């Protein structure tokens, strides 16, 4: 009987530790206008970050010129974050000729690839293992 009780308690403890979410606070700076929405993707792997698969966490929120801070609870892990300011409400980042974005965008760690493109996933990773704060400054 003691073995069964001990095993149940051990399994309960292991499940609690594994399934734990933590507070994640992100601040988005340099929002150009109150128009449209901010589209946020919190990606758990390179395929999601490359937008070949949906990000583990994704949502939108109304834009507000200046700075927005938001807190959510997410699973512990390493994530790459993508933010777009979708001013015209078409749910995508609009591009001009030669692929230059016409709307503001940003990535975690404020990293960018060549010519302002998306950085490698490894450079954008943020380790979320407790109460974590991230600031992303949008650019155009």
Image (cartoon, rainbow, N blue to C red):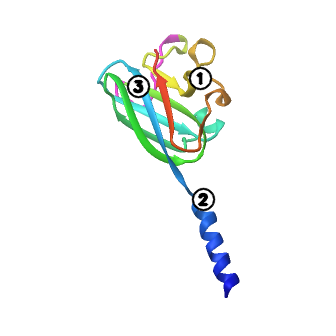
Which numbered mark, 2 or 1, is in the foreground of this view?
2
| Residue at which label 2 appears | 17
Please state the horizontal and vertical placement of residue 138, each as a whole percent of the image.
Answer: 45, 20
- Nearer to us in this view, 80 or 24: 24
Gap in angstroms between the C-alphas marked 2 and 1: 34 Å
| Residue at which label 3 appears | 85
Q: Nearer the N terminus, badge 3 or badge 1?
A: 3
Please state the horizontal and vertical placement of residue 105, each as a whole percent of the image.
Answer: 47, 22
Q: Nearer the N terminus, badge 2 or badge 1?
A: 2
Residue closest to the far front: 2
Q: Is residue 38 left or right of residue 98?
A: left
Disc ID at residue 66: none
Gap in angstroms between the C-alphas marked 3 and 2: 36 Å
For residue 97, above or below residue 137: above
Count up the numbered dots: 3
| Residue at which label 1 appears | 118
Query: SS of the residue at dot 3?
Result: strand
Please state the horizontal and vertical placement of residue 2, each as a whole percent of the image.
Answer: 67, 84
Q: Nearer the N terminus, badge 3 or badge 2?
A: 2
For residue 65, above or below residue 73: above
The residue range painted magenta reads: 87-97
Asked whether residue 91 is drawn in magenta, I would say yes
């Amino acid at each position: 009987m003691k073995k069964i009780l001990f095993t149940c308690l051990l399994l309960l403890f292991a499940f609690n530790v594994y399934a734990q979410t933590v507070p994640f606070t992100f601040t988005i700076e340099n929002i150009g206008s109150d128009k449209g929405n901010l589209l946020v993707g919190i990606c758990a792997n390179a395929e999601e970050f490359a937008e070949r698969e949906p990000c583990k966490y994704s949502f939108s929120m109304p834009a507000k010129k200046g700075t927005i801070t938001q807190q959510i609870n997410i699973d512990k892990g390493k994530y790459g974050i993508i933010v777009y300011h979708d001013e015209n409400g078409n749910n995508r980042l609009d591009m001009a000729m030669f692929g230059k974005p016409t709307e503001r965008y940003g990535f975690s760690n404020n990293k960018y690839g060549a010519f302002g493109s998306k950085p490698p996933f490894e450079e954008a990773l943020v380790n979320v293992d407790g109460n974590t704060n991230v600031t992303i400054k949008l650019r155009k």
